[in-house]
Image: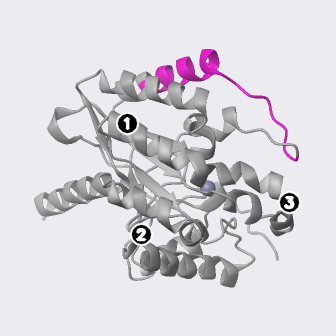
Amino acid sequence: MTYDLTPRPLNPADKAPAMTWPNGARSALFIGFDVDAETAWIGNNPSNIDRMVTTSHGGYDARVGIGKILELMEELSLKATFFTPGWTALAHAEVCEGILKAGHEIGHHGYLHKMPDREKLDETFEEIDRGFEALEKIFGIRPVGYRAPSGENFPELLAYLAKSGIRYSSSFRDDILPYRHRSAGDRPGVVEIPVNFAFDDWNFGMSSRTSPRPLFGRDTVLPLWIEEFEATHAWGGVTTLVLHPQVSGRPMRWHILRDFLRHVQSKDDVWIATGAQITDHFETLEKERKASSV
Ligand SMILES: [Zn+2]
């Protein structure tokens, strides 16, 4: 493999268009959960399949985390998007069905949570196909949203997602507004709802024997989230959460998340929406712009 290191914008997408949010809202909040379960521990490290304690970090999702998160969403009357690997849906069908029954959106999150690898295109595309198959089998739906497992992407994958009927991705970190990826072939690129890594709970709340990290509690996490949200709100952007039930479904972190969401809800000018709703809105504005420029 040789690498093209020519200086150029590595994401060729056009700049995000100016955005107005529905109902006069100043900003948007997109609550995204990644329901990795055990796949976070076996997708990129298959030998962990024989390490029951290591994989039990992910086992928390089905036993406790997903249920507690659904409880929180119901208490606060919120709808979220749950990016679910196909393996998780097959392994924990009953718990996962509860997500859909509660009226949340199911998104695509690979099959076994393998990080997309441009040097392994067949494997990358197989992850997409098998993910669709599993979600159709368990939920009877075909998701329109995709968040890359381990958050990686590249042009061939973006093109494959668009061809497969995916309408939006939520992985990139390069904006605070949704934008459309550059067209791949004869199809329009997918919409991107960019994420903010400050809202990835894994950074603050996951530590393991094999990957020890410092843990941060309320005094660090809640002010950081509130300040970042307030600043994004002032700039009129979208605050995208990258949460994991095996992290934010833990007792202390569940309370931090609840207090953060209550803070957002205390404002009357934030549009709290799923990824599909944000994509619908983006595409409506896009059509209006096209119509007015004709
Ligand atoms: Zn994940």
Residue under label 2, please give it: 189
Residue 52, quarter of picture: bottom right
Residue 249, image quadrant: top right
Would you say residue 152 is visible in this rendering? no
Q: Quadrant of the C terminus?
A: bottom left
| CA–CA distance in space, label 2 to label 3 | 40 Å
| Residue beneath the point at 55% across and 58% down | 11
* 40 versus 244 height, above or below: below
Ligand 1 position by quadrant: bottom right
Give, as a three-letter code, the residue at label 2.
Gly
User: Quadrant location of residue 157?
Assistant: bottom right
Say whether marks 2 and 1 touch (CB < 8 Å): no
Residue 198 in percent (x, y) is at 58, 34
- Name the residue: 24% across, 53% down: 281
Asked if residue 223 is among those painted magenta in the image, a careful observer would answer yes
Q: Which quadrant would the N terminus be assigned to in this image?
A: bottom right
Q: Which residues are magenta?
A: 210-229
The secondary structure that most of the magenta stretch takes on is: helix
In this view of the protein, which residue sits in the foreground, 292 or 222? 222
Q: Secondary structure at mark 3?
A: loop
Closest to the camera, between mark 2 and mark 3, is 3
- Above or below, 166 relative to 129: above
Residue for badge 1:
237
Image position of 258 with respect to 126: above or below = above
Q: Secondary structure at mark 2?
A: loop
Query: What crowding class fits label 3: few (fewer than 14 Cα within 10 Å), some (14-19), or many (20 or more)?
Result: few
What residue would you read off at disc 3? 51
Could you say which is closer to the camera, residue 287 or residue 35?
35
